Each structure stands twice: as C-alpha cells, then as structure tokens.
Amino acid sequence: MISDKVRPHHLERKALLHVRQSSAHQVLHNRESSALQYAMRDRLTALGWSEIEVIDDDLGRSAAGGVQRAGFERMVAEVCLGKVGAVCAREVSRFARNSRDWQQLIEMCRVVDTVLVDQETIYAPRHGNDRLLLGLKGSLNEYELDLLRQRSLSARYEKARRVGCGSARRLREGRRRLGEGPGSACPESDPVGVR
C-alpha cells in the first residue's frame, strides 16, 4: 500500500501513532475503539515505516481544549523538531477538536513536511488540496463538538421542564421555605422565568 505522498525522507524519520479516548468511561467501556486505534500501527508498517512510536498519554482526556494533553503536546514538539515523518490516528479528528490545536498541528506538519495518516487517507499539508481538506475537517470537528454541546443542553433543559416542572407548585413552596427568590431552573415554577 504505497502512496506517492509518502517519500523516502518521510520514512527515514519515525512515525507517531496517537491513541486517544475522550473520557475514562470510554477507556473502560469502548475497548474495541482502542484496539482499532492501536491497530493503525499495521497501516504505518504497510506504508513503509519501521520506527513507530505510540503516544497514548491522552487516554481519558478530551481533545476539545481546556484540558492539558501531554501526549498531544509531545507529538507537536517532536514534529517541530523535524523528527517525525508521519503522525497517525484512526481518524484525523482524534488529534484535536478545537481550531487552535488543529491549526497548530497542520501548520507544523506543513513547515517540516510531515504527513498525516488516518484509516482512509494520507494528507500532505504542503499540498494545497490536502491543506484545504484538513481545514474543512477541522472546522467540521469543532462544529460537531458545538452541536453535541447544544443537543446535550437542550436535552437537559427539556428533561428539567418535563420531569422537574411537573411539580411546579411543590418547587415554588420549597423555594419559599428555603427563602429563595425567583430564578428557578424550571420556567413554570417562576412566573418571571425564561420561557
């Protein structure tokens, strides 16, 4: 499985395989996903890499930002030093879910001529079309994360409205006893609440 994007100078440098799960729950319960990610080592071997380093320091850490990810930081640092011919993940979205980290990785790979590899494609950030596609994937990843957050918040709000507000009278009475004023999470329990 040779690609014209993988050149001899890429193969002279090591490949980094980044393995990540977003939460401790996923690490414990989504073992097949982890196994599929580790199996990407076979893809790198088939492409010609003999030196492959697995970076799995970020298991249980979200790529959404706000959480320090030592594995991702180490991967970017090694790319910057020109020691890496390829960075690999089962899906390139596994690298980062926020634009800052995503663009940093893509730009560093472009500068030092490191390819990105996933189960479907090899991306060469020095090629304009690949850079465009990676940019779109990064934007879609970030949008997907925002969409998931919105859905989660909407579901929680609806559940609170449906379940918690069915007893709006009890909520009002309980709040009076506690000495709390308006501003409950349930709109029906607060005549001035958001509807």
Image (tube, rainbow, N blue to C red):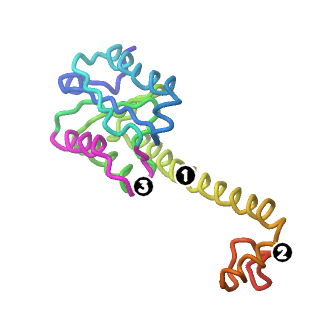
Q: Is residue 80 left or right of residue 25?
A: left
**Mark seen at residue 99:** 3
Marks 1/3: CA distance? 11 Å
- Residue lying at 36% horizontally and 52% vertically, measured from the top left: 101
Q: Are marks 2 and 3 in contact (CB under 8 Å)?
A: no
Q: Which residue matches tag 1?
A: 145
- Mark 1 or mark 2: which is in front? 2
Q: Is residue 47 left or right of residue 164?
A: left
The number of numbered discs placed on residues in the rendered structure image is 3
**SS at mark 3?**
helix
Q: Is residue 15 above or below residue 69?
A: above
- Residue lying at 28% horizontally and 30% vertically, measured from the top left: 16
The one nearer the camera, 123 or 103, is: 103
Q: Which residue matches tag 2?
A: 169
Q: Amino acid at mark 2?
A: Arg
Tell whether position 48 is magenta: no
Q: Which class describes the residues within 10 Å of circle 3: few (<14), some (14-19), or many (20+)?
A: some
Q: Which class describes the residues within 10 Å of circle 1: few (<14), some (14-19), or many (20+)?
A: some
Q: Is residue 33 above or below residue 127?
A: above
Q: Is residue 91 left or right of residue 174?
A: left
Q: Identify the mark nearer the N-term, 1 or 3.
A: 3
The one nearer the camera, 182 or 27, is: 182
* Residue farthest along the front direction in this orientation: 177
**SS at mark 2?**
helix
- Residue lying at 46% horizontally and 33% vertically, measured from the top left: 27
Residue 122 locus on image (x, y percent): 40, 29
